[in-house]
Image (cartoon, rainbow, N blue to C red):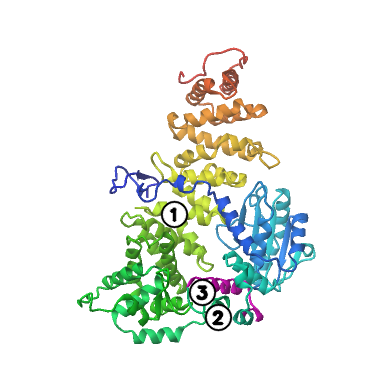
Amino acid sequence: MNDTFTRVNSPGGSVHAGQGDIYNFHSCTTGSFAQQTAGRSPRRIADDQLRLLRQRFVDPAGMGEARGLLVEHSTVILDGPPGSGRSAAARVLLYELHQSTGIFRELLPGDKEEVALTDAGLVGPGDRLLLDLGEADMAGWRKYRRDLSALRKAVQEQHAHLVVVMPRDGTLESDLQPYRAEISCPPAQEVFRRHLRFHQIPHEEYLQSAPASAEFLDAPRSMEEIADFADRVRRARGAHRTPDDFAGWCEQARDARKTWKDEVAGLVAERCTAPQRALLCTTAMLHGAHADVIHHASALLLRTLKTPRDTAHLLEGKDLAERLTEISASAGPDGCVRFDRLGFDAAVRVHFWDHMPDLRPLLSAWADRTAELVDRHLTEDLRRELVRRLADQYLRTGKWRELAALADKWGTGPAHPVRPEAAIHALSCGLESKQYGGNFRELIYTWCRDKQLAGDLAYALLRVCTEVIAPTHPDQAMVRLRHLARREHGGATPALDALCDLVATSSRLRRRMLDRLTRHSSAPAADARLFLRICDPVPLTDPGGSPRALLDENYMQGCVTTGWRAVLVHLPQAHWHPYAKRWLHTASDAGDRRDLLLDLLVDAADRDGTSLAALYAVARAAEPTTSSGSAHGVTTTDRLLQKISAAQGLRPTAASSRPAPPRGTTP
């Protein structure tokens, strides 16, 4: 297939005026990607997620020792019983470091895209690395344990930090024992109250006596179970049910742990008419929505199922309140519809999905049409929740491919304001799944590289790469964005912009991308265009918090030379002229690195007279706009000419004179 696409930036229909894919970025629906993601870099998203985790976190016993080991040795190996919050503790430890350089990332042992733990390029300066092996079997633990010493050495050399979560009952060699810290479950009551505070429940409420809460917390509970219980209390509090006090909310939260399987089956059997079951299913899928939304969506489900319309006079039929009572639901003071029992909505969704399989594709079509309803009560959060509830059923029953196909349909379907967001939410649910996240990352890689990206699917892929994959797996996001950027053609380049933003967060990512673009390129012309943006001379010559700048590395110098050579061969001068101009401006202000920057350009020309003459012409044009003054620009041009003359085998000329231009095309 072709590696380009034609961009159409109007809200009208698709127009194909060239070869390749069509990416439609509809200004009326998606808007400017740069505007939507301003201030939301992958590093910022990751830090925000970790900050929220820290707000809910209660230090377990042993956390102080873990902090001390991480600060002193740059590594800590966490041990502890399952359910004690080891993974959360690992993330909090890394968040608390507040490094000025580097990024947080989760290593993915066993993932075919992940490099070996012994790879020299795995660790970047100041990186905060999580290696979660808490669920690994003993064979896997032995395999990765052998490489921990090499990984630790790289971490120390790069002034980075590493937290390893080891499996329970796993063994450690004597040389790794000093870095082990064991944590235990924090007090359950304190964890519960911390989550309630996070949910903004006032302390004067949750300090009241609640026998159901005490009963729940007295039994051994994992941190995840306690968090779920606190969330159910939050939902009970917002449902306006009686009894309307903390003890009553805890009772409802306790009862919601039931599956309600038999109760739902009995209710469905009793309510056998199509309108009753449509209302029951709609209320479950849109639980907490306003009564108006429930009413219209229920009618829409009947139309989707092609159920004959009830011809009874409007005033003769049952009103909505009576119909809701029949399905054990009601509208609260806020007008929002909920079942009378907490957690009942999830049980209804499971029942319809599991016991009416022919309904599944129609539910997907109904969800699509429901999301497009025009109603002031149908908020973006409610649309997102509708997609999540539908996605949960696909993933719960192992139908991740069907969920991906649904996201594809939403992304490539007719233009509509909500369709791209629905595709994004569906893909996000898949990526965040513990069981199927890897499948979705692999599928998105294939789509970014090979799939015909019609409609708004390219936009959806761009969003999930930057907002879901990049915060924890930046290397994988970088690869996918590169494939999207390769296929861009036209004025706007949102995928390339996102790729540049991502590599700007880490010198290690920039190094890896320059290596891919120059040493391992299967499409030199396309990669040469990307190279010009990634190979920005300012970050290349700025060491930041690292011991040395990227351009001080011999390997990077080779990558830059190879990349510029491809640019001069494959791209017209009009395209690379502004980038060469920036390169020369940087050289004028680079002090002792000026000669290095000029040498790389001249070496890239490979003694080709035409290319050398073009570089000289760019240097002459750049002189007046040099930030440090035109005199510095003239000096840089003269120094460039000396190097060009030497490359052509001519006698070097004094820098103070203005000799004839190099042999080749006259500038």
Highlighted magenta segment, given as a residue range: 216-239
Secondary structure that dominates the magenta span: helix
Q: Name the residue located 47 percent from the left edge and 33 percent from the top edge.
A: 569
Residue 522 vertical placement versus 320 (above, below)? above
Question: Quadrant location of residue 296?
Answer: bottom left
Q: Nearer the viewer, mark 3 or mark 1?
A: 3
Number of other residues with Cα within 10 Å of mark 1, as a class: few under 14, some 14 to 19, many 20 or more: many
Q: Residue 462: horizontal and vertical position, in percent?
A: 45, 51
**Which residue was labeled with disc 3?**
236
Question: Quadrant location of residue 393?
Answer: bottom left
**Which residue was labeled with disc 2?**
251
Residue 539 vertical placement versus 635 (above, below)? below
Q: Residue 414: horizontal and vertical position, in percent?
A: 30, 56
Number of other residues with Cα within 10 Å of mark 3, as a class: few under 14, some 14 to 19, many 20 or more: many
Tell me which amino acid carries mark 3.
Ala
**Which residue was labeled with disc 1?**
461
Residue 242 horizontal side relative to residue 26, left or right: right
Residue 490 horizontal side relative to residue 520, left or right: left
